[in-house]
């Protein structure tokens, strides 16, 4: 397995919930020519879906304009209404996943190949529904803190969340390494967390540091994970 141009390192991002702060995050990714997968809940993708996190207002975006906003990035499933899927009956699990796939494909006119589990929780019934509907990978909220290729893409662990204390240390390690086999740096989070933490500057520093490296492939989750599929 190689990434394009025989590169052995790949960088990818994954962000959840389709909230207003994604607008700023997309601009940041585009500025540094980075690629992300955005995981959306089509059943509640509306400005009426809002909450407060540590004094910060968080609202999902309305559907209008999202196809243009996320252009150049990937859209993936996050379930219809963001429940803890393993607590639901099997029929409802199917509806949460299948209807989200259908809605997102209609909205974005694209093939949906991936998912991020809401709350990071799932069971074998959830995995079976993904397999039956040709979902090729699904991200958990676990952190590996390494760059190794994983064999079980339906229980995928990210390298780290963007709040991980070792984020920049991992970035420096990834940039400096000269691997003999493919490696992936996979970062995930929620864009509203940058407002909550007041750390947009940290994210821009990370993006600037990781960008424009000749030995790194910058891709969406599907572009990075499914090279051999």
Image (cartoon, rainbow, N blue to C red):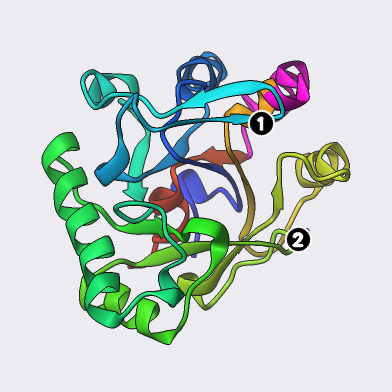
Instruction: Please tell me which residue lies in front, 122 or 184.
Output: 122
Can you say which quadrant of the picture contains the C terminus? bottom left
Q: Tell me the number on the disc at residue 229.
A: none
Q: Is residue 3 magenta?
A: no
On the image, the x and y values in percent for residue 49 come to: 38, 33
CB atoms of marks 2 and 1 within 8 Å: no
Over which residues does the magenta segment extend? Answer: 196-215
Q: Tell me the number on the disc at residue 146.
A: 2
Q: Is residue 124 left or right of residue 31?
A: left
Residue labelled with disc 1: 193
Helix, strand or loop status at disc 2: loop
State the residue at coordinates (21%, 66%): 95
Residue 65 sits above or below residue 89 on the image: above
Dot 2, crowdedness within 10 Å: few (<14), some or many (≥20)?
some
Disc 2/disc 1 C-alpha distance (Å)? 23 Å
Dot 1, crowdedness within 10 Å: few (<14), some or many (≥20)?
some
On the image, the x and y values in percent for residue 159 come to: 69, 55
State the residue at coordinates (21%, 44%): 104
């Amino acid at each position: 397995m190689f990434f394009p141009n025989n590169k052995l390192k790949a960088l990818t991002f994954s962000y959840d919930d389709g909230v207003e702060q994604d607008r700023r995050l997309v601009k940041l990714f585009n500025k540094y020519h980075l690629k992300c997968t955005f995981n959306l809940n089509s059943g509640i993708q509306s400005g009426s879906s809002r909450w407060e996190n540590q004094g910060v207002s968080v609202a999902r975006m309305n559907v209008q304009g999202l196809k243009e906003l996320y252009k150049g990035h990937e859209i993936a499933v996050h379930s219809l209404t963001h429940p803890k899927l393993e607590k639901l009956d099997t029929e409802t699990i199917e509806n949460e996943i299948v209807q989200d796939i259908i809605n997102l494909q209609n909205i974005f006119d694209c093939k949906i190949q991936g998912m991020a589990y809401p709350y990071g929780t799932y069971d074998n019934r959830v995995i079976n529904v993904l397999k039956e509907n040709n979902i090729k990978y699904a991200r958990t909220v676990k952190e590996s803190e390494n760059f190794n290729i994983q064999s079980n893409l339906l229980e995928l662990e990210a390298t780290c969340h963007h709040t991980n204390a070792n984020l920049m240390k991992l970035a420096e390690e990834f940039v400096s390494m000269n691997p003999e086999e493919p490696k992936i740096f996979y970062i995930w989070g929620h864009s509203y967390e940058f407002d909550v933490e007041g750390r947009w500057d940290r994210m821009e520093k990370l993006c600037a540091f990781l960008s424009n490296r000749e030995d790194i492939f910058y891709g969406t989750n599907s572009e990075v994970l499914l090279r051999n599929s």
